[in-house]
Image (cartoon, coloured by chain):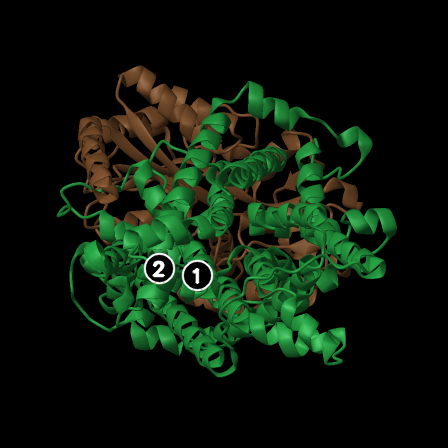
Amino acid sequence: MKLKNWCVGFTLLGMVCSVSAETLTVYSAGPKGLSKELVAGFEKETGAKVSLYQATGGKIMARYQAEKSNPHADVMISSSLGHAITLTKAGELLAYQSPNAKHVPDFLKSATYVSQGTAVLAIAYNTQSKLPVPTTWSDLTKPIYKNQVTMPDPRKSGSALTLVEGLSEQMGSKAWTLFSALKANGILIPGANKAALNPVLQGAKSVVFGAVDYIALDLKRKGETINVVYPTDGTVLAPRPIMILKSTKHAVLAKKFVDYMLSKQGQTLVAKTLILPARSDIKSDRPGFGELKLINFDTVSAAAHAEQTRDKFANIMGQ
Amino acid sequence: MSMYKVGKGVRAPLLLNTVSVTLLFMIIGLPVLAIILFAIFPKVNELSFAAPFSQFIPQLQDERLIVATLNSIRLALAVTFSSMLVAVVLAYMRSKMAESIGRMWDVLLLIPFLIPPYIGSMGWMQLLQSNGVLDQWLNINLSNVLFSFSGVVFVITLHLFPVIYFSAASSFKVIGQRYGDVAKIYGANSRQIFSRILLPLIVPTLLSTGLIVFVLTVEEFGTPNILGSRFGFQVMVTAIEEKMSDWPIDLSGASVLSLLLVVIAISAYLLQMFITRRFACKLDNQTMTSVPSKNVWFSMVSNVIFFIVVCLAVVMPIFAIVSSSLMRTVSLGLQWDNLTFNAYTHLFFSNSDALSAIYTSLGLAAMAAVITAIIGMLVAFTLIRLKPRGKAVLDILALLPNAIPAMALSVGLILTWNQTFWPVTPYNSLFILLLAYVCLMLPYPIRMLSNAMKQLPQSLDEAAAIYGANLFVLMYKILFPLMIPIMVASSCIVFAISTRELVASLMLVPAGTETVATYVFNQFDQGSISSGMAMSFIVIVISGALIALGQYMSKRYLS
C-alpha cells in the first residue's frame, strides 16, 4: 500500500520534473545573496527560468562528479580556479568568449572560463588587538605576533593554495623559510577560510595570514572591528571562474547567462559584495586592480604540481 | 516461528520478511551498494567499469590514514564509555524518581538531539577559548582543555549520552524493583544491588545503544572538524570529507575509506553480539515497575546531578547560541550595548526564505519520523520475533547508515537515483531528502524498538496464539499498543535530528530549495553568524515544542 503510494508520488514527481526541463541549472559557490540577485536579474531580463543550487565550492564539485552519468548542471560558478583548470584539462568545459569579456583582464579568463570577479589575498587583523599593523607577509614572523596568527589551510582553501604557490614562485626557497618561521612563531592553521577568520573575529587570535579580502571587508562594513591590509611585497588573486559544462543541453541560454554576469548590471551586483569585479571598467568601493601590487605567475603550470606544493607546506607545518 | 503460523496468517511471516527485506534493501542497501561499487570501480559515476580495484592500494597506503583510523577508534571508545557512565548513573536515578520530575528531566535531555553538533562545538568554543566568555567574565581560560582529546570527548559525550540514557531508563523501569527487594532481604547493599543485579540486567540495552554511540562517534564530523582541527587531530571522517570536498576531489577514494568505516562498524557489531551472548541474562515476566525512592537525600542528590548535567548539555550550548544570535557584531563580544534583536526581526519580517526553509524542514522531518517509526516497527518485529535466516545481515544493514558518513551516503544516493534507467526517481525533488533522512535515521527506531521488543515477554505472543489470534491481530492488538511509547520516543529523536540534518541536505537539496540547516550554513558562510544562530534557536524552540506536544498527546490519547 505504502509502496504504491510512493510509486504514485514518484510518477507525479516525474511529470513535474519533465515540465521544468526548459530551465537553466546553475551550481554556485560563494555569497548566496549575490547568486540569488544575479539569477533574479537574469530571469527578469531574459524571461528564462533558472534553478540555483547553492553550496560550497567543494560540494558543488562533488555533486557534479557524482552526477556525471546523468548531468544536471549547465553553468557552474566556483570559488576556486583549481576547479576550472581541472575541468578544462579533462575536456569537460564548453569554450566560450563572451563579448562582454573584452573588458576583463587576460589573467582572469581563458578559452573555457571567465571570472565573475576575484578575491584578493590579504592580511586581516582585529583592530582591538593593539598590535602594530603588519605591512609585509614576513612581518608576521616577528615575536610580537607570536601565537596571534592564523592561516587558512591550503588543503582546504584554494585561495590559500594560490598564495603559497605565488609566494614560492616569487621568493623561491625563501618562501619556505618564511613558512617555517611562521610555524616557529605559533601560526594556527584551523581549516578553510572561515575557520581561520573566526578566531580573529572573536578575539582569540589577532591576525589572518592570507585572508580572503572581500569577506573581511564586508564584515568591516557591518561594524566588526576588523581591517584589511595588502602586503607591500605583493599578493595574489583568487578568481571565481564561471564555467559552461560541455554536457549542457541549454548552451544558448548558458552563454546568455555568462553575458549577463559580465554585463554592467551583473558586474555592479558583484561589486556590491566587495568582490573585485572582473571588468576593469566597473567602479567599486574597494581597492581596484590599479591599487594592488600583484605577483604574476603562471597559475596553470603551478596547478600541475599543486599536490607537491600542498604536501611540502603540510610537512613544514607538521600536519 | 511456528506459533505465528496460525489460521489465516500462515503466509504472513513470509510476507513481513519480504517487505522488511525489500524496504531495507531499497532504502539502505542500494546506496551502500553504490558506495561499494564506486570504491571498486573508480569511474562508475560515468557508468564505466574500468580499472577495478585500482584505488585500494594507493588509498590505504597513506600513512596519515593509519593515525586517523586509530584516532577514530580511540575517540569512539572514549565517548562510548563516558556516555555509558553518565547515562547509567542518570538512568538509575531516574528509575527512583517521582514520575513528574523525572518526565521533566526526560524532556530536557531530548534537547541535545536538537542542537546540531557543529553549532554546539562553536558554542563551546565561544565560551571557553581565550578571550571567550569565561575568560572575559571570570578570567578562566580553558582553551587548552577544549582543544584537546578530552575536550572533544567531553563535547561529543554531552551530545550523545541521551541515546543510551533513554533506553537504559526504560530498561531500569521494566526490570523493576522486585529483584532489588529480594536481594535486600538477603542482605545486599544498594551498591551490590546495582552492580550485581541491575547492571547485568541492562547489559544488552547498554551494549546495543553503546554500539550506536560508538558508530555515531566514528561517523561524527562537526565536532572533530571544528575542535580537532585546532590541535591537529584528524579522524577518518575528516579525512573522507577532505577527499570529498577539497581539491582535487576524489569521490572514489572517499568511498574506499568509507568502506573502512563499515568494517569498523561491523567489527563493533560482532563484538557487541559476542559480549551480549556471553554476559546477558534473559528474563521473562518482567511486569513490576519500580517505585520512587522515599529517601530524601537520594532524591536531592539525584536532582542536583541531573541539574548539573542539564546545565552542561543543554543550558550552556543554548546560552552560547542565544548570546551569539543577539550580538550586533562578533568582535565586540558579549556586552550590553552590543546586543540587539535585529537578527530575529530580520528573519520574521523581511525574509520569506527563512520561513519557507522552516516549513520545508519541519514537513520533511515529520514525514521522516512517521515513516521510520512504521518501518522500524516492521523490521524490529521481523528481527526479534520472526528471526528469519540471515537476520544478522538485516541487523547490520540497519546499522550501516550510522556508520557511513552522511556525505558518502549522499553520494551513494546520487549514484543510485540519478540514473536514466529508472522510470521515475526521487532525485532532484524534495523526495530525495525524505529518502535520505529516512535512510540516515532508520537505525534509531530499529534499535530502540528491537530492544523494547526483546524485553516484552514472548509469552504474550504465545497467549495470543493460543486464543487464535493471527499475526496481524497480534501485532495490532498486543504489540502495537505496548510499543506506542517507544515508537513515539524514537519518532521524536528522528524528528529532532532531521530538522537540523546538514551534510546530506547540503549535498542533495534540489536546486532552488533550502532547509533549515542549509539556510543556517549559508548564513554562516556569508558571515552573518547572528542570523544563523537566531534561525538555529528558533528551530530548536519550535521542534522542541512540537516534540513536547507529541509526547503529551501520545500519553493522553493513546495509552
The correct choice, above or below, for B502 with respect to A278 in the image is: below
Of mark 2 and mark 1, the one earlier in the sequence is 2
Q: Chain of mark 2?
A: B
Image quarter of residue A191: bottom right
Q: Is residue B304 above or below residue A113?
A: below
Label 2 sits on what residue type?
Phe
Residue pictured at 22% horizontal, 56% vertical? B9
Q: Residue at x 50, y 28 (%)?
A: B354
What shade does chain B have?
green
Front-lying residue, B58 or A265: B58
Find residue B523 and report its horizontal and vertical position in percent: 54, 36
Whether residue A282 is visible to the viewer of this picture, yes or no, is no
Q: Which chain corresponds to the colour brown? A: A
Residue closer to the observer: B519 or B549? B549
Q: Marks 2 and 1: CB-CB under 8 Å?
A: yes
Left or right: B51, with B77 as reference point: left
Residue B14, located in which quarter of the rendered image? bottom left
- Real-space Cα distance between discs 2 and 1? 7 Å
Disc 1 packing (10 Å; few <14; some 14–19; many ≥20): many
The reply, left or right, for residue B33 in relation to residue B344 is left
Q: Which residue is mark 2?
A: B381
- Which residue does the numbered mark 1 point to in the structure image? B453
Amino acid, disc 1: Met
The picture places residue A182, in percent across and down from the top left corner, at: 65, 62
Residue A18: % across, % down: 17, 31
